[in-house]
Image: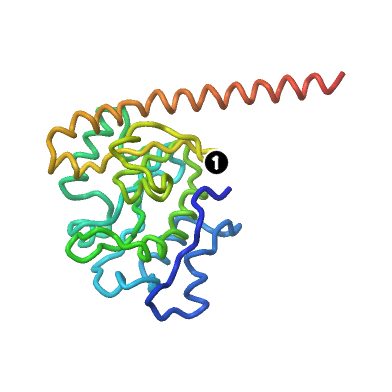
Amino acid sequence: MTVVTGFPGILGTDVSPNQERTAVTANRADDSLEQVASEVKVCPLCELCRSRTHAVPGEGNPQARVMLVGEGPGWHEDQQGKPFVGASGKFLSELLTNAGLSRDEVFITNVVKCRPPGNRDPLPDEIQACSGYLERQINLIEPDVIVTLGRFSMSKFFPGEKISKIHGLPKEIGRRLVVPMYHPAAALHQGALKATIQEDFDTLPKLLADRERARETSREREDRHSQSSLF
């Protein structure tokens, strides 16, 4: 099932038709997170490929019930090829722990897989170029809950909204529950947001429990329907 709409754009880049298809080959029977990662590491679809040290495909549990989608790699992530390993990553681990989760249980990625120079905001064509990779990751993992971290990640799912207005408010999109939250880095610059971000993260266990109860209720209804059809 496709959750994220739109496919990678190649504005301002010289990309062959074969390269263009690389990022958008979603829903293939033989697709895998490893395949996505291998393509991301050599991706030529936008100008960020010229300045990156390492692309950052994302990492975590391939069967995660929670998927975290940040904005883009920073300097530390660009050096190591891993998401959220700098100061904001340390705070993210703290947020997860306080919410009863661990990094081993979730999958972490970004809307752009390469660091924008100088840690500037990602540009629309850069986000578009990576959207096929994100779509494939969502389809492969099939998380119950997607947490967007920051306004650029939020805008992929809630275009035109303000994060100050909708943070912490879950919305059903397709079969996924999407919850917009502030980026952990925001708390490093605005200390007053730290408690707000933690409060939003603390809702995750209940959201997961509610999803599981809904799934069980659906299975029970299907079982009753199946049994009644026998008579």
Q: How is the image coloured?
A: rainbow
Q: Position of residue 114 (x, y in %)?
A: 30, 63
Of residues 32 and 186, the one drawn nearer to the viewer in this rendering: 186
Of residues 196 and 58, the one drawn nearer to the viewer in this rendering: 196
Q: Residue at x 34, y 47 (%)?
A: 108
Q: How many marks?
A: 1
Q: Residue at x 50, y 58 (%)?
A: 6
Q: Is 24 left or right of 112, judged from the image as shown?
A: right
According to the image, label 1 marks what residue? 174
Of residues 117 and 57, the one drawn nearer to the viewer in this rendering: 117
Q: Residue at x 38, y 49 (%)?
A: 155
Q: Secondary structure at mark 1?
A: loop
Q: Is 136 left or right of 195, judged from the image as shown?
A: right
Which three-letter amino acid code belongs to the residue tagged 1?
Gly
Q: Position of residue 197 (x, y in %)?
A: 24, 33
Say if 38 sits above or below 144 in the image. Answer: below
* Other residues around mark 1 within 10 Å, as few (<14) / some (14–19) / many (≥20): few
Say if 198 sits above or below 12 in the image. Answer: above
- The quarter holding residue 9 reads bottom left
